[in-house]
Image (cartoon, helix red, strand yellow):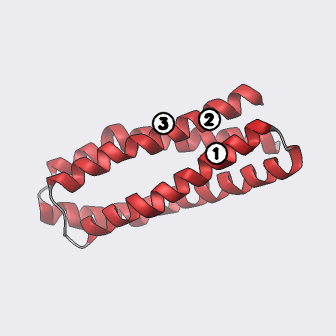
Amino acid sequence: MSINLLGILIDFGLVVLIWIVQLIIYPSYTFYNHKNLVLWHKKYTRLIAYIVGPLMVVQLTLSIYHYITETEPYQLLKLILIIFVWVITMLQFVPLHNRITINQFDDKVLLSLVQKNWSRTILWTVILFIECLFI
């Protein structure tokens, strides 16, 4: 398997995953009572990290590699977008998820999770589009 194909597969996997999270998983949080959501959320975040973590690390690693070896302008754009996804995830989503985990949330927090996640959904979709457009 070529490194370019691996990059497209990783990007595609993250896009599929983020759309499922955006349209199904995060909106489903409003159907749980607080106690059940806290119980489920602890399990969900632990398990989803086994999927998302490696995909994000590989995506970032491949993007850095491509930027260094190819020095094409679109590679810089893609790398910047990926870094932006990481920053948003760490600064916005980790704290929101932590609030749910420790049962310090309300409906506004759950709505915020869905609304703010549109940024990652759009960014990862654009990243895949850039990858497919220039490969």
Q: What separation in Å lies between label 3 and label 1 (alpha carbons)? A: 16 Å
* Lateral position of residue 78 relative to residue 73, left or right: left
Q: Residues within 10 Å of mark 3 (few under 14, many from 20)?
A: some
Q: Is residue 67 left or right of residue 80?
A: right
Q: Give the residue type that dot 2 points to.
A: Leu
Q: Earlier in the sequence, mark 2 or mark 3?
A: 3
Note whether residue 10 is visible. Answer: yes
Callout 3 amino acid: Ile
Residue at figure coordinates x 75%, y 54% from the top left: 64
Q: Residue at x 31, y 68 (%)?
A: 42
31 displayed left or right of 112: left
Task: Tell me, for residue 128, which label it has, or none.
Answer: 2
Distance between the alpha carbons at the discs numbered 2 and 1: 9 Å
Q: Residues within 10 Å of mark 2 (few under 14, many from 20)?
A: many
Q: Which residue is mark 1?
A: 10
- Give the residue type that dot 1 points to: Ile
Quadrant into which the C terminus falls: top right
Q: Which residue is at a point 31% across and 40% down the rendered structure image?
A: 24
Where residue 103 sits, quadrant-wise, is: bottom left
Q: From the image, tell me which residue sits under label 3.
A: 122
Mark nearer the N terminus (3 vs 1) = 1
Label 2 element class: helix
Real-space Cα separation, disc 2 to disc 3, in angstroms: 10 Å
